[in-house]
Image (cartoon, rainbow, N blue to C red):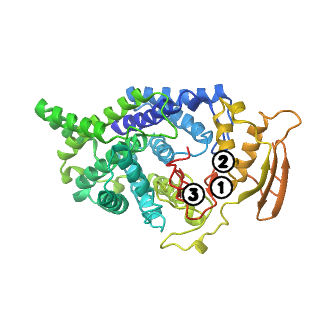
Amino acid sequence: MLLTRMLAGAILIHEALYIFRDGLGYLTNCFLPTFGLRLGPRAHAWVHGGLMATCGALLFMPQAGWLQLTCLGFLSLVIASYSLRLSNHLILAWFMMLTLCLARGVEQMETFVSLGVQGLIVLTYFFAFLHKLNADYFSPERSCASQLVDFLCWDRGVHSPGLIRFLRGVGIYGTVLVEGALPLLLLFPPTRPLALGVGVLFHFSMALLGIVNFSSMMYAGLMAFVPEQALLDATAQVRALPPLVIGASCGFSLLVVWVLTPRHANRHCPYVMRAPAWLIQLGFGAGTALLLLGIGMLSWRSLEVPGWALLGSLEQGTLLTLWAAFLVNGLGPYLGFKTEFSFAMFSNLRCEPWRHLFIPGNWRLFQGPDYVRIAHIEGLPPVSTLQGDPGALLAHRVLSQPEAYRYTRYFLRESLSRLSRAMSPGHPLRVRYVDREGSHEVDGDTSGKLPGSRGGLPVNFFPFILPDDPEAPHSEQGTVLNGKERQLF
C-alpha cells in the first residue's frame, strides 16, 4: 500500500529533520510534554527509536497489521511526551495511522482507508482556511505569511519594496485561496486531478521554506484520492517516458530547491547537521517532480470509483465517528478549550485577543486559557550554569522577560522546577505573579500546584507563552517580538 509507505516515510522525515536540527537532544530532552508524559532521557530515546524502527519496517511490510498497531502505539507515546509544541502533522499522522488500524478485518479495506483519509485531508484544508480568517493574518505587519515572505526575501537578497509588497499579497491571499478551494476541488472527481496538482505545488512551495515534514505528510494524504489501479497505470506511463524528460523534470525541481531554499533556515535554532537535511530537501524535490508527472497522467474518470455505498453500516459509523473526533479537535479554538494542534497552521489565530472575522469570541463554550503575569522575579541562575539543558535555557530566556510575556501555569511550574535544580543552596528563586484570582508568591521549587491554581493540568492545550503586547505577531508557530525574531523555538 503506497499510502502506508508514504505515511511511514513522512514520519521518518519528521524525525530525521528534527534530529539534524537539534542533534541527539531531540531524542532525549523531555520538557513540558504535551500530555504530561515525562520520560527520562533513555526512555524518551527508546520511544523515538521504536517509532522510527516501526516506520522503517512499514516501508517493506506496509500490510502488516501488527506493525501498523505498534507504530500507532509508539506514535501515541511520542505525542504524549512531545516537548513544548506538538506539530500539527503528527496529529494528522496519528489519525491516518488509526484509520489503517481500524481497517483491519474490514472486507472493503482499501475503500475504508481511502475514504477515511480523504475525509481527514478535506477537513485539514478546511481548518487551515477557517483559522486564517482573522484580522492578524490579513495584516501585512503581523501575518505569518508576510513574515515568511520577508524572511525569504532577506535570505535571498531581495530588497525591492514593491516586489516585497507584491509577494506579501501573494503569500497572504494566495494561501487562503488555495486552502479554501482545495477541499471543494477534492470532493468531486472531475476536479480532483487539478486539486492534486495544485496541492502538490502548494506543499512544495512550503517545503522550500523548510517545512518538508508537513508537506510529505500531506503528499501521503493526497494519494488517498488516487485508486490503486489508477496509481499503477500512472506509474507505468511515467516509466515509459523518455529518460530525458524524467531527468529534465527532476533536474529542474532540484534547481528550484537549491536556488530558493533559505540558506539561513532556523537562524535562531541552527541545524546541528545541515548537510543531511539538504539531502532530504533535494530528495523531496526530485520526488515532487515524479509525483507531478504521475498526476499529469491521471484522468478524472480513473478517480471516479464507488465508495461509501460499498461499506456496511458499522464501517460507515466508524468513519463518521473518526471524522467527528477530528472535527472536534480542529474546532477547539472556537469551543475555547484549546488552540494547539488544531491545524491553525501559520494562521495567527490567537486566544487573546480574539480577532476572528466571522466567529465571535462570546460563542466559545469554555473559559479558555488561564495565563499568569509575573510581577517580580529574582534569583535566576546564571546562564552558564544551565548549559546542556535546553528546557532550562528556554525557561531562563522567557522568564527573564516578564514585561514581554504571559505564561501558562504548566510552563511556569515546570520552568521553576527546572531552574531550581541549578540554584545554589540558600538562594532560591522568588516569584510574585498575578492571575485572575489575585497575587501569589512562590519561593524555590514548585513540584506541585502553584498557589491559586485551578486544576493545573499538565497539558499543552494553549501556547505556553503569549506576548503581553496584543499587537505583537503571534501564532502557534512561535512568538515574534519587534520584528527581530522569526520563531522563538
Judge by depth and name the residue closer to the eye, 78 or 19.
19
Contact? badges 2 and 1 (CB < 8 Å): yes
- The Cα atoms of the two marked residues, 2 and 1, are separated by 7 Å
Of the two numbered discs 1 and 3 on the same chain, state the one appearing first in sequence.
3
Between marks 1 and 3 in the image, the one whose residue lies nearer the viewer: 1
SS of the residue under disc 2: helix
In the image, residue 447 sits, relative to residue 299, either above or below, namely above
Contact? badges 3 and 2 (CB < 8 Å): no
Of the two numbered discs 3 and 2 on the same chain, state the one appearing first in sequence.
3
Mark 2: amino acid: Val
Quadrant of the frame with the C terminus: top right
Mark 1: amino acid: Tyr
Judge by depth and name the residue closer to the eye, 366 or 422.
422
The residue to which callout 3 is attached is 339
SS of the residue under disc 3: loop
The residue to which callout 1 is attached is 405
Indicate left or right for 238 with 39 as reference: left
Mark 3: amino acid: Thr
- Give the crowd class for mark 3: few <14, some 14-19, many >=20 residues within 10 Å: many
Residue 1, image x and y in percent?
Answer: 35, 36
Residue 372, image x and y in percent?
Answer: 73, 58
Of the two numbered discs 2 and 1 on the same chain, state the one appearing first in sequence.
2
Between marks 3 and 2 in the image, the one whose residue lies nearer the viewer: 2
Residue pictured at 48% horizontal, 54% vertical: 343
Indicate left or right for 285 with 322 as reference: left
Residue pictured at 28% horizontal, 48% vertical: 201
Residue 442, image x and y in percent?
Answer: 84, 49
Q: Which mark is residue 398?
A: 2
- Give the crowd class for mark 1: few <14, some 14-19, many >=20 residues within 10 Å: many
Q: Can residue 37 be seen in this view?
A: yes
- The Cα atoms of the two marked residues, 1 and 3, are separated by 18 Å
Residue 249 lies in quadrant: top left
